[in-house]
């Protein structure tokens, strides 16, 4: 398979492996726990810190468990002012960055290389975090979409490319644009493996309008009885059909034959699926498609074209934010995505208990969308946001706080009740369309001060308007705000003290087995430091975060202690035991199926060895 080459690739290719683990440190004051609960790392998370290090910090608990990832990285237009500052240890890499300078600007001839060098290790970690049946969605524009495709093909596998969605981000072209006004962004979709299954989307009112006929079999719509083949190509589909009501016999056109063979047509008759119109005298038959027989409970298959009426637009996204709070200053530096866009992604790629990750969180739209969808369908989806910038608390988390609790609002609140794209067929049935709009006004009008009916950009729009002065209804939920602690190379802990038992347990378990440890077993005298197990290993950490204890004989692995660990090993798995020292030879330990693992070297430096 062709690979994408860029300056610095050889240095960042495995950089994600050398990124140190960091502990996630809870900031209780900035958290919003559920009533009666304490902030916890198994809650929804908002993490403030370098997203490369944050992704590495998430691995011990979330590797292979994230169901849906959405990211909105810098588009690398040259106007964003982003900086490449990953601590790649190569002197050549450091010299290159030093010479070329930061931030990355349009005139920087190597800005594409820097962007790729920044994205590569983050995508590698995101790939590790994604569940086998999960998918990643990435917003991007023309500046980097082709390079991003090449990089994703290499990391996720070309066979796991799923779709390129075109999102119409604007509802009108910019008249002052010097070239051709851009109206769309891309959303690239890759799956982790072929076990990913997308959901069907909820049927819209417009789709249901097609089902306007009814008989003893239920509500149905009529569809074409022919297919796009010629009589020469499919002579078996060019035959005579008789209308049982009139006795008239009809052939299809030679350029478009019947869609069903004579035998299939006979079965359609027997099942009552052939329709000759309301009066039974139509010139050609149609096929009855019953609403109750739709696959997937009547949902619709997602497409790759998402217009603004379906998934929102950038102007809507800014208005959403300003309605929550006046963030005029922040909006000069960020371009938020509309909640509807992310909700559509969640509808396609998640279920009620999915974990959703956004490592370029920005204004927190992903969390807003998760909470809104949970409110809508009673789900328990969980979000993890990572934001590098200083506004992680004052914008990202503050927005989430406000939508959870409700927020003070004064002005006109608008709710779109109907958006019906207009076409010639619908205009021919204008009376029915007007009746539909008036019916909505009649039944929904009591909830609003005013209901307006307008035509906007080729669509009939019915909007409810209500003057509000008070507090909006909150969506409910909670989150824990966290920052990144010291590097868990343990080298950094010389000045900061020994790591907590639970933190070190997650670290050694992941580095030893490559598996995540969600919960550390509660320690008792009979556990002998047991922390978790896999299908092959049973892992013990014989450790206390106490310098005096670690320097004593009590911290050493003894024959008596090993016998007790082996006796508790009912599954006869291989034992991995982390300890400061041992009073037994490895030969004797191996005979009992025990592998001694020295505590990381930095622990001994702290102990003074």
Image: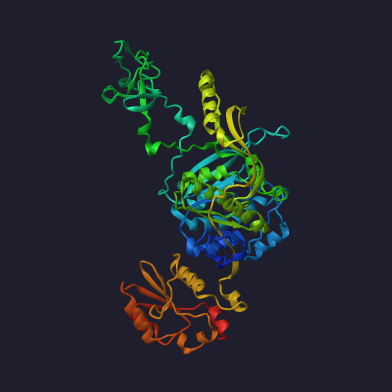
Question: Which quadrant would the C terminus be assigned to in this image?
Answer: bottom right
Q: How is the image coloured?
A: rainbow
In the rendered structure, the answer to whether residue 136 lies left or right of residue 239 reads right
Q: Position of residue 448 (x, y in %)?
A: 59, 36
Q: What percent of the width, then of the height, locates residue 410?
A: 67, 44
Q: Position of residue 299 (x, y in %)?
A: 43, 37
> Which residue is nearer to you in this view: 176 or 375?
375
Tell me which residue sits at (54%, 50%) in the image. 475
Above or below, 154 against 141 in this view is below
- Can residue 146 be seen? no
| Direction from residue 490 to residue 232 in the image, left or right | left
Front-most of 468 and 533? 468
Residue 177 screen position, x and y as percent: 72, 35
**Relative horizontal placement of residue 91, taking residue 528 as reference (left or right):** right
Q: Quadrant of residue 337?
A: top right
For the image, the number of numbered tags is 0
| Res 554 seen here | yes
Residue 557 vs residue 423, the one in the foreground: 423
Q: Residue furthest front?
A: 446
Q: Residue at x 59, y 33 (%)?
A: 463
Q: Is residue 57 above or below residue 303?
A: below
User: Is the residue 444 above or below the residue 31 in the image?
Assistant: above
- Relative height, residue 247 to residue 370 (above, below): above
């Amino acid at each position: 398979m062709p690979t994408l080459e860029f300056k610095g690739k050889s240095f960042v290719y495995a950089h994600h492996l050398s990124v140190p683990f960091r502990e996630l440190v809870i900031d209780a004051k900035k958290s919003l726990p559920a009533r009666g609960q304490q902030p916890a790392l198994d809650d929804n998370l908002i993490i403030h810190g370098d997203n490369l290090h944050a992704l590495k910090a998430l691995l011990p608990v979330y590797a292979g468990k994230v169901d849906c990832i959405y990211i909105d990285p810098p588009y690398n237009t040259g106007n964003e002012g982003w900086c490449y500052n990953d601590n790649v240890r190569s002197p050549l890499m450091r010299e290159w960055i030093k010479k070329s300078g930061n931030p990355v600007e349009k005139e920087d001839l190597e800005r594409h290389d820097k962007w790729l060098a920044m994205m590569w290790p983050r995508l590698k970690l995101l790939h590790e975090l994604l569940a086998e049946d999960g998918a990643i969605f990435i917003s991007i524009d023309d500046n980097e979409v082709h390079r991003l495709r090449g990089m994703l093909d290499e990391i996720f596998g070309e066979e796991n490319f799923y779709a390129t969605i075109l999102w119409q981000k604007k509802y009108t072209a910019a008249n002052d644009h010097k070239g051709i006004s851009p109206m769309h962004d891309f959303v690239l979709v890759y799956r982790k493996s072929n076990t990913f299954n997308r959901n069907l989307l909820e049927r819209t009112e417009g789709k249901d309008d097609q089902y306007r006929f009814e008989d003893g079999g239920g509500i149905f719509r009529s569809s074409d009885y022919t297919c796009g083949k010629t009589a020469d190509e499919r002579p078996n589909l060019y035959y005579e059909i008789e209308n049982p009501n009139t006795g008239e016999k009809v052939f299809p056109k030679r350029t478009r034959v019947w869609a069903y063979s004579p035998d299939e047509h006979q079965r359609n008759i027997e099942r009552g699926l052939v329709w000759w119109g309301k009066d039974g005298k139509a010139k050609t038959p149609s096929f009855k498609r019953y609403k109750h027989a739709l696959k997937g409970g009547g949902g619709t298959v997602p497409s790759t074209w998402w217009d603004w009426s379906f998934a929102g637009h950038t102007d809507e996204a800014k208005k959403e934010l300003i309605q929550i709070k006046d963030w005029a200053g922040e909006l000069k530096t960020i371009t938020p995505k509309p909640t509807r866009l992310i909700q559509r992604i969640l509808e396609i790629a998640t279920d009620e208990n999915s974990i959703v990750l956004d490592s370029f969180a920005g204004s927190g739209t992903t969390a807003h969308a998760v909470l809104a969808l949970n409110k809508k369908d009673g789900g328990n989806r969980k979000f993890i946001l990572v934001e590098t910038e200083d506004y992680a608390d004052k914008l990202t988390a503050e927005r989430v706080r406000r939508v959870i609790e409700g927020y003070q609002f004064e002005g006109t609140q608008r709710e779109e009740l109907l958006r019906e794209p207009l076409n010639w067929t619908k205009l021919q049935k204008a009376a029915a369309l007007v009746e539909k709009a008036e019916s909505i006004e009649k039944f929904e009008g009591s909830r609003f001060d005013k209901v307006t009916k307008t035509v906007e950009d080729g669509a009939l729009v019915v909007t409810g308007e209500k003057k509000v002065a008070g507090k909006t209804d909150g969506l409910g939920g909670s989150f824990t705000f966290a920052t990144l602690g010291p590097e868990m190379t343990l080298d950094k802990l010389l000045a900061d003290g020994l790591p907590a038992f639970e933190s070190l347990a997650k670290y050694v378990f992941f580095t030893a087995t490559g598996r995540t440890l969600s919960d550390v077993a509660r320690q008792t005298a009979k556990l002998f430091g047991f922390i978790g197990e896999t299908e092959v290993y049973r892992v013990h950490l014989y450790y206390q975060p106490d310098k005096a204890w670690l320097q004593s004989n009590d911290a050493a692995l003894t024959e008596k202690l090993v016998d007790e660990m082996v006796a508790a090993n009912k599954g006869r798995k291989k034992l991995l035991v982390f300890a400061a020292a041992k009073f037994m030879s490895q030969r004797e330990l191996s005979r009992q199926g025990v592998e001694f693992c020295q505590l990381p070297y930095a622990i001994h430096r702290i102990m003074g060895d």
